[in-house]
Image (tube, coloured by chain):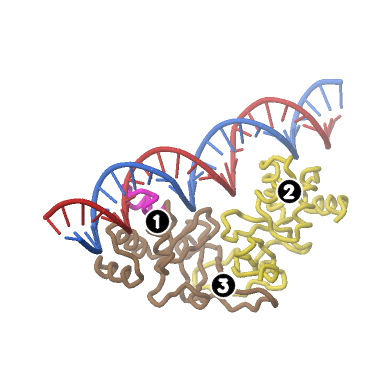
Chain colours: A yellow, B brown, C red, D blue
Amino acid sequence: MENNEIEKKLESKNVKPTAMRTLVYKTLAESGKALSLAELEQRFEKVERSTIFRALKSFEDNFIVHTVDDGSGSVKYAVCDDECTCNIHDLHVHFYCTRCGRTRCMKELPIPNIKLPEGYTYDNAQFIINGVCPRCD
Amino acid sequence: MENNEIEKKLESKNVKPTAMRTLVYKTLAESGKALSLAELEQRFEKVERSTIFRALKSFEDNFIVHTVDDGSGSVKYAVCDDECTCNIHDLHVHFYCTRCGRTRCMKELPIPNIKLPEGYTYDNAQFIINGVCPRCD
DNA sequence: TTAAACTTTGCAATAGTGTTGCACTAACTT
DNA sequence: AAGTTAGTGCAACACTATTGCAAAGTTTAA
């Protein structure tokens, strides 16, 4: 993905595209999966944890990325689709490979609709499937 | 729940029922919901965190409790049903109230069956719904 | 019943994640 | 150009999870 495409994308979601943010977005997008703060940090060595953290937070607040808590002990971040508004209808299943620790967005698998008992509201959900991915099998 | 019932239960799952373990189990069972280590710790003041932690681990290893990672930042523990063997068929949805922070086992809502793409195995899953519970609404 | 062997517990320490305050720099405004 | 605002790096901190070790308790077996 070209830098200026990324810049346009960030701008369209009201995040000023600084050099750091562009880099973080690019890295995350190109990884093709969900990455934790620590994993992102390792991918560039030079950049401060807090800077990446704040970039991710601003992405999250503006629906540029979504978070996945896959039980690995650290929250992971993955880029959203263009049309994603991070509401219930955009939610999908995530797959966590217990062998390699990789977390993948299963965009083709939307989270099934669940009918909660009376009195409960449904704002958000996480559906994580643990298993072994084709790569590790 | 009577202490000797609890002791029988633990023994039947191959965990030696010490005083601490019985206490931890009892507290968790009577709470009727999923509790974190910190929450359990607060409920008795006198007992070491690591002792509770190790009790919970042994429960978990022996299918006496299951864990829920509800995104609150700490793992929670909830007692299993008697027949539970913690495999896919015993899994149920958990509800996390974003207002009070309580996590409830929705035993009446089994996790729906998902057909993964070729090559993926399905060992385990977590399905957490976030919203507001009747109590907080 | 007593010593040896093992288990459990409490305490202290540690690693890792997430998060914030503060000062410095860069960018934007008028 | 000076002033204001936003972004970055550094250091510090809180909290969760986890472990090593030694003391206390329990079980085993002579």
Closest to the observer, C26 or B60: B60
Name the residue at 40% across, 62% down. B58
Quadrant holding the N terminus of chain B: bottom left
| Quarter location, residue B55 | bottom left
For badge 3, the amino acid type reads: Asp
Q: Real-space Cα distance between discs 2 and 1?
A: 35 Å
Pointer 2 residue = A43
In the image, residue B52 lies at what x, y percent?
37, 54
Q: Real-space Cα distance between discs 3 and 1?
A: 24 Å
Pointer 3 residue = B123
Contact between marks 3 and 1 (CB within 8 A): the answer is no
Q: Point out the stretch of residues depicted in magenta.
A: B39-54
In the image, residue A115 lies at what x, y percent?
55, 75
Q: Chain of mark 2?
A: A
Closest to the observer, C14 or B78: C14
Using a 10 Å C-alpha cutoff, classify the residue at mark 3 as few (fewer than 14 neighbours), some (14 to 19) or many (20 or more).
few
For badge 1, the amino acid type reads: Arg
User: Please, is residue B30 above or below residue A62 in the view?
Assistant: below
SS assignment for the magenta stretch, majority: helix
Pointer 1 residue = B54
Q: Chain of mark 3?
A: B
Element under label 2?
helix
